[in-house]
Amino acid sequence: MSPQPYTTDAFQGYYFVRQAGRELDYVRLTFDVFYRQQKDIGNPAVLRIIMDELGLDGAAFAKALTNRAFRAEVDQNWEAKSALNLEGIPAYQMNGEKIRGYHTPEEWRAILLDQAEKTMAGLVCTPEGCGPASQPLD
Protein backbone atom coordinates (compact mmCIF):
# COMPACT_ATOMS: atom_id res chain seq x y z
CA MET A 1 0.00 0.00 0.00
CA SER A 2 1.35 3.39 -0.85
CA PRO A 3 1.62 5.83 0.72
CA GLN A 4 2.43 4.16 4.02
CA PRO A 5 -0.33 4.50 6.61
CA TYR A 6 -0.14 6.53 9.78
CA THR A 7 0.30 3.69 12.29
CA THR A 8 0.06 5.23 15.76
CA ASP A 9 -3.37 3.62 16.23
CA ALA A 10 -2.01 0.26 15.07
CA PHE A 11 0.72 0.50 17.69
CA GLN A 12 -1.89 1.37 20.30
CA GLY A 13 -3.66 -1.80 19.18
CA TYR A 14 -0.59 -3.77 20.19
CA TYR A 15 -0.83 -2.49 23.76
CA PHE A 16 -4.56 -3.19 23.81
CA VAL A 17 -4.09 -6.84 22.78
CA ARG A 18 -1.15 -7.25 25.13
CA GLN A 19 -3.64 -7.07 28.02
CA ALA A 20 -5.15 -10.30 26.65
CA GLY A 21 -1.80 -11.93 25.85
CA ARG A 22 -2.54 -11.89 22.10
CA GLU A 23 0.42 -9.82 20.87
CA LEU A 24 1.79 -12.37 18.43
CA ASP A 25 -1.65 -13.07 16.96
CA TYR A 26 -2.21 -9.34 16.54
CA VAL A 27 1.14 -8.73 14.89
CA ARG A 28 0.65 -11.62 12.47
CA LEU A 29 -2.88 -10.59 11.54
CA THR A 30 -2.01 -6.89 11.25
CA PHE A 31 0.91 -7.67 8.93
CA ASP A 32 -1.34 -9.92 6.85
CA VAL A 33 -4.04 -7.26 6.63
CA PHE A 34 -1.50 -4.64 5.55
CA TYR A 35 0.92 -6.53 3.34
CA ARG A 36 -1.32 -9.17 1.79
CA GLN A 37 -4.78 -7.65 1.91
CA GLN A 38 -3.45 -4.14 1.23
CA LYS A 39 -5.74 -2.53 3.82
CA ASP A 40 -4.95 0.68 5.67
CA ILE A 41 -3.91 -0.27 9.21
CA GLY A 42 -3.93 3.43 10.05
CA ASN A 43 -7.73 3.32 9.76
CA PRO A 44 -9.39 2.65 13.15
CA ALA A 45 -12.24 0.77 11.42
CA VAL A 46 -9.74 -1.70 9.93
CA LEU A 47 -8.09 -2.12 13.33
CA ARG A 48 -11.45 -2.73 14.95
CA ILE A 49 -12.09 -5.54 12.45
CA ILE A 50 -8.73 -7.04 13.45
CA MET A 51 -9.77 -6.91 17.11
CA ASP A 52 -13.05 -8.59 16.28
CA GLU A 53 -11.24 -11.29 14.28
CA LEU A 54 -9.06 -11.96 17.30
CA GLY A 55 -12.17 -12.33 19.44
CA LEU A 56 -11.39 -9.18 21.40
CA ASP A 57 -13.77 -6.33 22.19
CA GLY A 58 -13.60 -4.03 19.17
CA ALA A 59 -15.81 -1.45 20.87
CA ALA A 60 -13.49 -1.34 23.90
CA PHE A 61 -10.56 -0.88 21.54
CA ALA A 62 -12.31 1.98 19.73
CA LYS A 63 -12.93 3.62 23.12
CA ALA A 64 -9.27 3.13 24.09
CA LEU A 65 -8.25 4.92 20.89
CA THR A 66 -10.62 7.79 21.58
CA ASN A 67 -9.30 8.06 25.15
CA ARG A 68 -5.68 7.69 23.99
CA ALA A 69 -5.29 4.98 26.61
CA PHE A 70 -2.04 3.62 25.18
CA ARG A 71 -0.61 6.72 23.54
CA ALA A 72 2.02 7.26 26.26
CA GLU A 73 3.47 3.77 25.67
CA VAL A 74 3.57 4.33 21.93
CA ASP A 75 5.24 7.73 22.33
CA GLN A 76 7.81 6.28 24.72
CA ASN A 77 8.74 3.54 22.27
CA TRP A 78 8.83 6.02 19.39
CA GLU A 79 11.44 8.02 21.27
CA ALA A 80 13.45 4.85 22.00
CA LYS A 81 13.63 3.90 18.31
CA SER A 82 16.30 6.50 17.61
CA ALA A 83 18.58 4.88 20.17
CA LEU A 84 18.19 1.62 18.24
CA ASN A 85 18.71 3.39 14.91
CA LEU A 86 15.41 2.06 13.55
CA GLU A 87 13.87 3.75 10.54
CA GLY A 88 10.86 1.50 10.11
CA ILE A 89 9.39 -1.88 10.87
CA PRO A 90 9.82 -4.69 10.50
CA ALA A 91 13.56 -4.29 10.93
CA TYR A 92 16.24 -6.89 11.48
CA GLN A 93 19.98 -6.79 11.71
CA MET A 94 22.27 -9.59 10.63
CA ASN A 95 26.04 -9.34 10.36
CA GLY A 96 25.75 -5.61 10.90
CA GLU A 97 23.41 -5.18 7.92
CA LYS A 98 19.92 -3.77 8.23
CA ILE A 99 17.16 -5.79 6.66
CA ARG A 100 13.94 -3.79 6.38
CA GLY A 101 10.40 -4.48 5.38
CA TYR A 102 8.18 -7.43 4.71
CA HIS A 103 9.69 -10.37 2.86
CA THR A 104 8.13 -13.47 1.36
CA PRO A 105 9.43 -16.87 2.48
CA GLU A 106 11.40 -17.10 -0.76
CA GLU A 107 13.01 -13.71 -0.14
CA TRP A 108 13.88 -14.73 3.43
CA ARG A 109 15.52 -17.88 2.12
CA ALA A 110 17.71 -15.81 -0.19
CA ILE A 111 18.53 -13.32 2.60
CA LEU A 112 19.45 -16.08 5.05
CA LEU A 113 21.59 -17.92 2.49
CA ASP A 114 23.39 -14.68 1.67
CA GLN A 115 23.98 -13.96 5.35
CA ALA A 116 25.18 -17.53 5.97
CA GLU A 117 27.61 -17.20 3.08
CA LYS A 118 28.96 -13.96 4.54
CA THR A 119 29.25 -15.54 7.98
CA MET A 120 31.13 -18.53 6.64
CA ALA A 121 33.42 -16.54 4.33
CA GLY A 122 37.03 -17.31 5.21
CA LEU A 123 36.17 -20.27 7.41
CA VAL A 124 37.26 -23.83 6.90
CA CYS A 125 35.24 -26.63 8.41
CA THR A 126 36.56 -30.09 9.24
CA PRO A 127 35.15 -32.89 11.41
CA GLU A 128 36.94 -31.18 14.32
CA GLY A 129 35.06 -27.90 13.81
CA CYS A 130 35.22 -24.63 11.91
CA GLY A 131 37.80 -21.91 12.10
CA PRO A 132 39.62 -19.23 10.10
CA ALA A 133 41.26 -20.57 6.93
CA SER A 134 44.48 -18.87 8.01
CA GLN A 135 44.67 -21.01 11.15
CA PRO A 136 44.52 -24.74 10.38
CA LEU A 137 42.54 -26.79 12.87
CA ASP A 138 44.33 -29.60 14.70
Image (cartoon, rainbow, N blue to C red):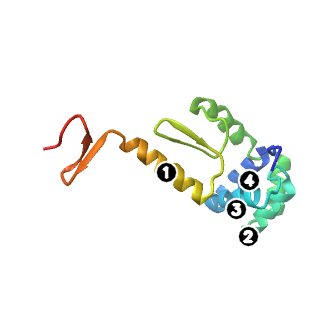
Which residue is at a point 77% across and 47% down the rendered structure image? 69
The residue nearer to you, when weighing 83 against 109, is: 109
Q: Position of residue 133 (x, y in %)?
A: 25, 38
Disc 3, SS: helix
Q: Sequence-wise, which precedes: disc 4 or disc 1?
A: 4
Determine whether label 2 and label 1 are within 8 Å by CB: no
Of circles 1 and 3, the one toward us is 1
Left of 120 or right of it: where is 10? right
In depth, the one of 17 and 119 nearer the eye is 119
Q: In this rendering, would 67 be left or right of 110?
A: right
The kind of residue on which mark 3 rests is Leu
Q: Amino acid at mark 4?
A: Gly
Q: Are marks 3 and 4 in contact (CB under 8 Å)?
A: no
Q: Is residue 19 visible?
A: no
Is tag 3's residue or tag 4's residue first in the polypeptide sequence? 4
Alpha carbon separation for disc pair 1 and 3: 24 Å
Q: CA distance from mark 4 to mark 1?
A: 31 Å
| Residue at image mark 3 | 29
Write down the residue under mark 4: 13
Observer-side mark, 3 or 4, equals: 3
Dot 1 or dot 3: first in sequence order is 3
Callout 1, which amino acid? Leu
The image's mark for residue 55 is: 2
Q: Which residue is mark 1?
A: 112
| Distance from the alpha carbon under mark 4 to that under mark 2 | 14 Å
Q: Is residue 54 above or below residue 119?
A: below
What amino acid is labelled 2 in the image? Gly
Task: Please tell me whether mark 1 sits on a helix, a strand or a loop.
Answer: helix
Displayed quadrant of residue 27: bottom right
| Coordinates of residue 117 in the picture (x, y in percent) | 42, 46
User: Which quarter of the rendered picture does the C terminus lie within?
Assistant: top left
